[in-house]
Amino acid sequence: MDQALMRRTHMPAIASLALVAVALVASAQGRAHAAKSASLEIATFNIDATPPMGAPLCDALCQPAAAVDDPLSCRGVVLLPGGQQPIVLISLDWVGIGNEGQDAWKAAIAAAAGTTVDRVAVHAIHQHDAPGCDFAADRIAAQYGLGGRLFNVAFARETIERAAAAVREAIRSPQRVTHVGAGRGKVEKVASTRRCLGPDGKVKWVRFTACRDPEAIAYPEGRIDPCARAVGFFQDDRPLAVLTYYATHPQSYYCKGRVSADFPGMARAQRERELPGPLHMHFNGAGGNVGAGKYNDGSPEMRPVLAGRLAAGMKAAWDDMEKLPLADERIDWATTDVSLPPGKHLDESALAAVLENDQTPVGDRLRAARHLAFLRRCQAGGTVTLSRLRIGKVDLLHLPGELFVEYQLAAEALRPSSIVCVAAYGDYGPGYIGLHDSYAQGGYETSEPASRVAPSVEGVLMRGIEKLME
């Protein structure tokens, strides 16, 4: 999570590009399902996901909702490939959905679509003036008198029910897909590295969402993925759905209690106006260590500027699209389960002590509840499902947490002849996921408040990505 808003915490650690496998390994065997004769239907839905006034925003790190600048949405596609069970992809204008939040979303959507939970991918775009969802963390918080402080639990469950109802309604009238296309377009002056290294190789500045420090602004753009991607599903020449992808923290300014889908939502709305008709969905890529800080001073006037730049990249990706007949393509869905290693700083007795002490600031106690939810999940043998949808030379890769962009670049390098579209911010339970060497470099993203995984996570996750990208 972008922590311009957490100045009361210390800000440690980042990574290098050491994308080599470490010790721990992907825990479950991959599961793949392919259709050689690529018949495909698609059903789409779009529901409101705006929280009520007074609801906590950004896991209670921001002021609660007091106004709505623009509404939030939950958008999804149900893909119905011939000879296979349905596949559901969902994108929400929420900050994150973790642990039992993911479980609840996937179970309800899978039941509504008539499929299995491993064929459902639920992702947040990670706007901060938006709610989160983690029923395990709320249950732990409630044991200490803090129930409902992280997010509005009733609203979250009601949104899940409405999304499931929207899926049931959508699959009653699917549309035949004849062509699929994908393209790339460069986005100018939005993304930049958040982690600015000094001569000693340590993080000298964390260049958050907004930055006004001239030295930090002057620091190079750094390692990013400069391209937006667009995937189109067509019935002949008519687009039915457009999925866009771009890796960056999606904030311009925030934490004033004004609900907003921020500049990615504005960019998506601009593309809807420019290309009316199809459903427009957006996914946030691996932008854990990427933000708009080099190009954003945090003023309200910059939000539409950033939105326009992102929309231009989305349009460029659309214009670059190569549309191919679906009959010539192969549809393949694959998953693998990984056991993410919890960080050594997640100590159950110490976290319980923080929760028990009612003299401790509420924000620290709520963070302890989120840490404890992830730790107990790991202790119980819980895994995270990674998934990949391949249609010809298009790969849609679904990954957890606030991933560093190097994971996205590595996935793309594994399939150089394909257009690889990475959706991160799936299961939000692990928090930030850095590289092995990041954890010794300092900076916020790999600090104890921000990341719940150990440095060995790189090897585990890369092994899973390599398996899916074969």
Image (tube, rainbow, N blue to C red):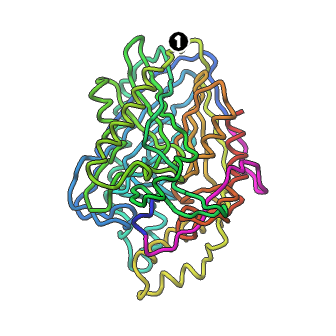
Q: Nearer the viewer, residue 84 or 179?
A: 179
Q: Secondary structure at mark 1?
A: strand
**Is 312 inside the magenta-drawn segment?**
no
Q: Looking at the image, which residue is at 67% across and 42% down? A: 465
Residue 354 in the image: x percent, y percent?
A: 50, 82
The image shows residue 331, relative to residue 212, as above or below, that is above
Q: From the viewer's side, name the closer residue of 272 and 399.
A: 272
Q: Is residue 23 highlighted in magenta?
A: yes
Q: Is residue 176 left or right of residue 456?
A: left
Q: Position of residue 443 (x, y in %)?
A: 56, 65
User: What residue appears at the point 66 percent right and 57 percent down from the top-left corner?
Assistant: 340
Local packing at callout 1 (Cα closer than 10 Å; few below 14, some 14-19, many 20+) is some
- Asked if 209 appears above or below 175 in the picture, the reply is below
263 on left or right of 428: left
Q: Amino acid at mark 1?
A: Pro
Q: Quadrant of residue 373?
A: bottom right
Q: Position of residue 132 (x, y in %)?
A: 40, 58
The residue under the point 57% across, 51% down is 403
Q: Nearer the viewer, residue 125 or 185?
A: 185
Report the front residue among 430 and 85.
430
* Secondary structure mostly seen in the magenta stretch: loop
Q: Quadrant of the C terminus?
A: top right
Please tell me which residue is depicted at 31% across the width and 23% down the height of the picture. Answer: 275
Magenta range = 7-31
Image location of residue 2, percent across then percent down:
45, 59
Q: Which residue is the site of mark 1?
A: 325
